[in-house]
Image: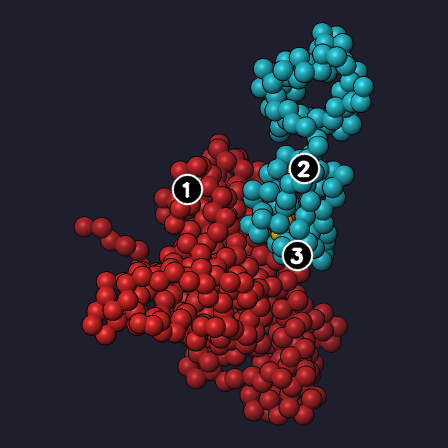
Amino acid sequence: MGVEKTYSEINAKIKAGHAVVVTAEELIALVEEKGLSKAAQEVDVVTTGTFAPMCSSGAFLSFGHTTPRMKMQKVWLNGVSAYAGIAAVDAYIGAAEIQEDDPLNSNYPGEFRYGGGHVIQDLVARKPVKLKAVAYGTDCYPRRNLETTISLDDINEAILFNPRNAYQNYNCAVNLTDRVIYTYMGMLKPHMENANFSTSGELSPLLKDPHFKTIGVGTKIFLGGGVGYVAWNGTQHFPSMIDVDGKELGSSGGTLAVTGDLKQMSPRWLVGTSYLGYGATLSVGIGVPIPILNEEIARYAAKRDDELFAPVVDYGAAYPSFTPGNLGYVSYAELKSGKIRVNGKEITTAPLSSMPRAREIASTLKDWIQKGEFLLTEPVKTLPSPSDGIVAHSIKEA
Amino acid sequence: MSPKRIVLRFGTDISVKPIVYRLVKDYDLVVNIVKADVNPQKEGTMILEVTGDQSEEGLNYLRNLGVSVQDLKQEIVRNEEKCVMCGACTGLCPTGALYMERPSMEVRFDGDQCIVCRLCTKVCPMRAMEVHL
Ligand code: SF4
Ligand code: SF4
């Protein structure tokens, strides 16, 4: 019978300052050295990390009232429209919204230099941001126009709320057509001349707990340089597992909805991002601690890049036309080596997610836990796992 | 007269033509090839130092052939504050001036290899690659 630990036992060790915390990469080395059972016994917490563009990100901002009062109907921050259909002086700024006068893709491929993600980065960097609002005017909220400058410290609340982040796994994108294409997976040259991928592999939070044994609603995480929480499963949470040659992998997998106080986050970990020909977004840093409650959890947390796989998908035709299937699977070890082989062709690979930053997140989180500043939370509700067999719907047209 | 430093970029159709010979023969230019990467499968790039009275005429001859001609007065620099070392640029930089160190996956920039094609200034999602004049 292997080791069994509880959250409170691990937290007691963290408080006492003798919890054993390692990053996912360090766990892999430890398992190689001592074997799984011994490593599972010794290690209390494994930290993970990812830093990549995450489109479904945004922030709720509650500005505070004007004199006279105003029921803001339409709101712009640095020219980027925020959704104001919530309450009088509240708005939600979405990372993928573009500045209103942007030429978009009419100047193909568009550059999308400034969007909601950039507004969020500017806010968290404590830069002044232009606020413009219009309203229709009511008896209780008579004001109709506002133009002013705000900063993060002088508004009431700023809550990062990202409905879909931390994708468990993602496609490796190629282009089979004979023209250059511009996608959210970057610029893809014709005839599969390059391939882009976007998951941190053996450091990726949800690949290390693929059955959602420890990550659930209420899990305390590293978010944007501060502390955040898992609020729910993310949208498009499809934690299905596929077997390739007896190996386990997540196809696109689960996602997390995450939230936290933007005011304690940092512009290093929330970075406005622009994809040529595609749009603007926000790159987000997320780190999730995985308590090693038993050997099974340790076994998944110790998966190496050569045991984790991504599907290769043609973004030239198959992806846009929603054709199912893929061109096969490649391991993260191959992807990170800089070359993969698809249909007999050798292709140069490049990541869109930053491995050095993922590593920095995992080790920062490790530091916080070791110093006793960060305790683990037991989920108040588990998230759907592969065994729940969630099926994706698509839009039906009459 | 000090030489003009220029960057040439051309398609596979040009790479089979004796363009440097023409510059020397027809326009009486002194041509020094600083760097050349002519791969018949990909687009070719060349950095030349050109001296001679007819250098403008010579360059126009190249432009008429469909060769892109740019001054090498510009320089590409990486804004270290902005670069997140994602690596998105490394698969596209034609000369390997932006490359990834393994296994750390840290992105390095070697300005000496850069031919100022400006591709990275557009594809870098953080706009960390900047043109300096
Ligand atoms: S794409 Fe930009 S941010 Fe990413 S590594 Fe290259 S220069 Fe740095
Ligand atoms: S401009 Fe950028 S992409 Fe082009 S060679 Fe220089 S570093 Fe590489």
Q: Which residue is mark 2?
A: B133
Residue A288 to residue A146: above or below? below
Please say whether residue A356 is visible from this viewpoint.
yes
Residues tagged 1 and 3 counted as in contact (Cβ below 8 A): no
Q: Residue B41 at what x, y percent from top left?
A: 62, 28
- Mark 1 belongs to chain: A
Label 3 packing within 10 angstroms: few (<14), some (14-19), many (20+): few
Please say whether residue A202 is visible from this viewpoint.
no
Gap in Å between the C-alphas at discs 2 and 1?
26 Å
Residue B116 to residue B70: above or below? below
Mark number for residue A103?
Answer: 1
**Kind of residue at disc 3:** Glu
**First of labels 3, 2 by sequence position:** 3
Q: Colour of chain A?
A: red
Which color scheme is applied? by chain
Q: Residue A88 at what x, y percent from top left?
A: 30, 71
Secondary structure under badge 2?
A: loop
Q: Residue B24 at what x, y percent from top left?
A: 76, 11
Residue A157 to residue B36: above or below? below
Gap in Å between the C-alphas at discs 1 and 3?
27 Å
Q: Residue at x 72, y 56 (%)?
A: B103
**Kind of residue at disc 1:** Pro
Q: Colour of chain B?
A: cyan
Q: Residue at x 74, y 23 (%)?
A: B4
Label 1 packing within 10 angstroms: few (<14), some (14-19), many (20+): few
- Give the quadrant of the C terminus of chain B: top right
**What number of labels is visible?**
3
Gap in Å between the C-alphas at discs 3 and 2?
20 Å
Residue found at the far front of this picture:
A67
